[in-house]
Image (cartoon, rainbow, N blue to C red):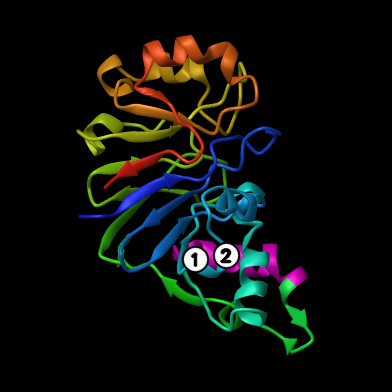
Amino acid sequence: MADANLVLLGTGSAESLHYWNSNALVRTPECNILIDCGFTIKYALADIGMTLQEVDAVFITHTHGDHIHGLERLGFEARYIYQRRPTLYLEADLYSIIWEQCLTGSMGQTSCGSNRLEDFFEVQIIKNHTFTVGGCHFRSFSTPHTIGKPSYGLVLNEQLLFTSDTNLIPNLETFFPSGPIIHDCCLQAQNPVHTTLHELIEGYPKTLRQRMTLIHYGDGVDFYRALMDREFFGVATQGQVIEL
């Protein structure tokens, strides 16, 4: 799609002090769509000269704080300052978790009285794992992240795959046979809910790894950078722009 791109707003793990949350932004001539909305979202947007007022829509991959805790701020500012409702795209199994388990405590009761998620966002439940916004086509797919918690990655315009947080994805090479991949990478030796650097190298063939840009790393990334550059396409940088 002409003039559309993906901006890697942040590249860090939830524990990182030096990198924002691993959230992204799809910019099209018609609108701006966040992929996740973590607790560092305002700072990440400010780094590229944007504010929450310019966010038109959000897709949430899963319900961990570095991916959803910015929704409270976005919802409050959109409603009470900008008088608008951004569109919130959700897989059906995330709706009740996001509102009833995550946001109700802070957003369920305000000076306006009792609220629903729809008072802050125009909620769109995704049908058949696909949706189109701003002329960009999105295809969601289930990822193996935290046991018992639904989580999703995205394929954008059938050109680029964004895993968000995940363990190794079975049959990834068959599922997405060509094109760049933005893949979760944990620098710890072991982690039950993220793909470690060792697991990436041992679990995916070199031809697949050469299509991968690594994201969600920790503050010690420079120690591993030479290895990551050698074994993969590269390491994601904050503010990096990828054309779609």
Q: Residue at x 64, y 58 (%)?
A: 70
Which segment is the magenta one?
Answer: 90-106
Q: Position of residue 197 (x, y in %)?
A: 50, 18
In the image, taking residue 138 as reference, residue 217 lies left or right, namely: right
Q: Are marks 1 and 2 in contact (CB under 8 Å)?
A: yes
Three-letter residue code for mark 2: Leu
Q: Position of residue 37 (x, y in %)?
A: 57, 56
Image position of 225 with respect to 214: above or below? above
Which quadrant of the view contains residue 205? top left
Name the mark on residue 52.
2
Residue 1 visible here: no
Q: How many marks?
A: 2
Residue under label 1: 55
Q: Residue at x 77, y 82 (%)?
A: 110
Q: Residue at x 53, y 22 (%)?
A: 196
Q: What element does badge 2 sit on?
A: helix
Examine the structure image and report whether residue 232 is included in the region drawn in magenta.
no
Q: CA distance from mark 1 to mark 2?
A: 5 Å
